[in-house]
């Protein structure tokens, strides 16, 4: 028994000493240092077992086999490189002291420094990782590469993206962190390397999934485990709440159970797709027309006016005091935030305006001239062209009748994106999607937990907020095939939602849909609507949101 036990301890210690770790964006070395400490603590447990759990008074050979030379990193900042090297040396010294406390009589002087730290200074996206450590010698890739959004990258970072993703389509929509996934996948080849990276959750949402993960999956990459979105608070005095995911991936055969971590729950999975769902590898790509036979939605008009055609209520009143004859040219106007907050704004609307009456409104003409000058000063060809018609929005959308309005951006704290019917007199801006002539049935389905689950899974994000879209979210949404009874139930429950809102005429949609202040009557109306829509799909009310999205993706696949 002792011989078998000693053999297993020996094998385990040798395995610990054989593993190699690489952080290709190591910063000050936190991931490398913590991993080294964890391995050495495991090794100290092995050493303790080898000496029978007691300190020995005799001198022994060096019992330590785990070394900081098993750890490799790349960092672009020279000061951070120095910090990372120092951190590993400090960790080595700390663990040496712990080993000395286990094996009495063992003495290995830490100073002078005898071990080399494998931290390379440079741009990880322009260095051949094999020059740092050959892929055949590596066990694990780990780290949290830089979080820089697609629209916020410096010119040099954009060059990195273009070089890493040469030949790929739509890479302008990928965040900077995506480069490390692509480079890691290329580097690991067919070697038995496992990777796990902390990233902004944007890489598992919206267009990024099809742009990044579809080619990676087709090349043989698969996700072994994943942590769904969690908030990572910075240690700075001004907190930066970054919404992150952790994706573990490889090309090697994985015989272990795949796991999806969501909050405190560990969920076994048969497959983990690019949306971090236990479902097939389905990719929701841009679609210009709805998947199902439902009304189309479109973004409101875009002013591109330098602010000269848009006025607050106070500005409008002041304007009309000086130029009352301009009254016919003012219309209610809403962008997404105006819609949710119900804060009145107005626009100067000159579609079909009588030129004779316009000539009697010098203040209107002054603003129109400023719109023209603003557009002519632009470097964009389309904006310059719009200067030819300075009386009009650059793109125009006007509804003669009532329409459903859907805000393009909504807080992720809301369970439901607030939608509502607006009067045709209100001009929608380009932060509102609109559905004209929509029935209560469409409203009920759109406001349901089923549609919201789909939206949360496939939409893009603006910071952490939901960014609704017609091409990704709405047009790809698989609507239920309903009976007349289903339709009637959904129409009825949709009307109850609207009725519950009327009980609070002084409350805007922000207050009504705040989780803390949402009225009980509105909650009940939504619950009833959720049940009616789920019944139309044949879904059980016991399904989790992830289960719901998984079933919707199956429907989506069938409807393709």
Image (cartoon, grey):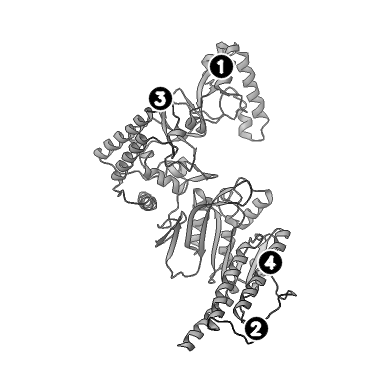
Which one is closest to the eye, mark 3 or mark 1? 1
The residue indicated by pointer 4 is 119
Which one is closest to the eye, mark 2 or mark 3? 2
Task: Give the residue drawn at x 63%, y 70%.
Answer: 71
The secondary element bearing badge 3 is classed as: loop
Residue 22: quarter of image: bottom right
Q: What crowding class fits label 2: few (fewer than 14 Cα within 10 Å), some (14-19), or many (20 or more)?
A: some
Image coordinates for residue 369, horizontal then vertical, percent? 65, 21
The residue indicated by pointer 1 is 317
Q: What crowding class fits label 4: few (fewer than 14 Cα within 10 Å), some (14-19), or many (20 or more)?
A: many
First in sequence: mark 4 vs mark 3: 4
Label placed on residue 347: none
In the rendered view, would you say 307 is above or below 17? above
The residue indicated by pointer 2 is 105
First in sequence: mark 2 vs mark 4: 2
Task: Say whether marks 2 and 1 touch (CB < 8 Å).
Answer: no
Which one is closest to the eye, mark 2 or mark 4? 2
């Amino acid at each position: 028994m002792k011989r078998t036990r000693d053999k297993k301890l020996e094998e385990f210690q040798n395995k610990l000493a054989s593993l190699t770790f690489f952080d290709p964006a190591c910063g000050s070395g936190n991931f490398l240092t913590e991993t080294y400490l964890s391995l050495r603590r495991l090794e100290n447990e092995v050493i303790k077992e080898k000496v029978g759990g007691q300190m020995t008074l005799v001198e022994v050979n060096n019992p330590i086999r785990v070394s900081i030379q098993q750890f490799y990193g790349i960092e672009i900042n020279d000061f951070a490189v120095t910090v990372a090297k120092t951190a590993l040396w400090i960790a080595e010294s700390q663990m040496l002291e712990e080993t000395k406390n286990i094996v009495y009589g063992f003495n290995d002087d830490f100073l002078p420094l005898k071990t080399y730290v494998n931290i390379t200074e440079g741009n990880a996206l322009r260095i051949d990782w094999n020059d740092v450590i050959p892929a055949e010698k590596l066990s694990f890739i780990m780290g949290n590469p830089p979080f820089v959004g697609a629209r916020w990258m410096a010119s040099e970072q954009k060059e990195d993206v273009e070089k890493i993703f040469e030949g790929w389509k739509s890479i302008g929509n990928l965040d900077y962190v995506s480069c490390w996934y692509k480079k890691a996948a290329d580097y690991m080849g067919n070697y038995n390397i496992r990777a796990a990276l902390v990233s902004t959750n944007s890489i598992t949402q919206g267009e990024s999934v099809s742009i990044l993960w579809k080619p990676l999956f087709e090349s043989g990459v698969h996700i072994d485990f994943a942590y769904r979105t969690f908030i990572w608070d910075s240690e700075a005095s001004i907190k930066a709440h970054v919404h992150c995911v952790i994706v573990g991936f490889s090309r090697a055969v994985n015989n272990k159970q795949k796991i999806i971590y969501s909050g405190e729950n560990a969920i076994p999975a048969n497959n983990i797709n690019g949306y971090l769902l236990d479902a097939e590898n389905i990719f929701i790509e841009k679609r210009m027309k709805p998947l199902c036979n439902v009304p189309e939605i479109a973004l409101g008009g875009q002013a591109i006016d330098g602010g000269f055609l848009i006025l607050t209520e106070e500005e409008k009143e002041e304007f009309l005091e000086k130029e009352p004859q301009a009254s016919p040219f003012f219309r209610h106007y809403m962008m997404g935030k105006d819609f949710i907050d119900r804060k009145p704004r107005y626009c100067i609307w000159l579609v079909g305006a009588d030129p004779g009456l316009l000539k009697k409104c010098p203040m209107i003409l002054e603003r129109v001239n400023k719109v023209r000058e603003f557009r002519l000063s632009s470097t964009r060809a389309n904006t310059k062209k719009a200067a030819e018609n300075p009386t009009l929005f650059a793109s125009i959308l006007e509804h003669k009748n009532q329409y459903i309005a859907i805000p393009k951006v909504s807080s992720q704290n809301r369970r439901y994106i607030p939608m509502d019917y607006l009067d045709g007199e209100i001009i929608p801006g380009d932060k509102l999607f609109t559905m004209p002539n929509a029935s209560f049935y469409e409203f009920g389905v759109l406001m349901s937990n089923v549609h919201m689950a789909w939206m949360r899974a496939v939409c893009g994000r603006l910071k952490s907020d939901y960014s609704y879209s017609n091409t990704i979210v709405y047009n790809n949404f698989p609507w239920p095939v309903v009976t007349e009874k289903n339709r009637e139930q959904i129409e009825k429950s949709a009307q109850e939602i609207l009725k519950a809102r009327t009980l609070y005429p002084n409350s805007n949609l922000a207050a009504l849909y705040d989780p803390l202040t949402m009225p009980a009557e509105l909650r009940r109306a939504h619950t009833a609507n959720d049940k009616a829509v789920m019944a139309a799909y044949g879904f059980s009310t016991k399904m989790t949101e992830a289960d719901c999205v998984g079933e919707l993706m199956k429907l989506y696949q069938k409807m393709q």
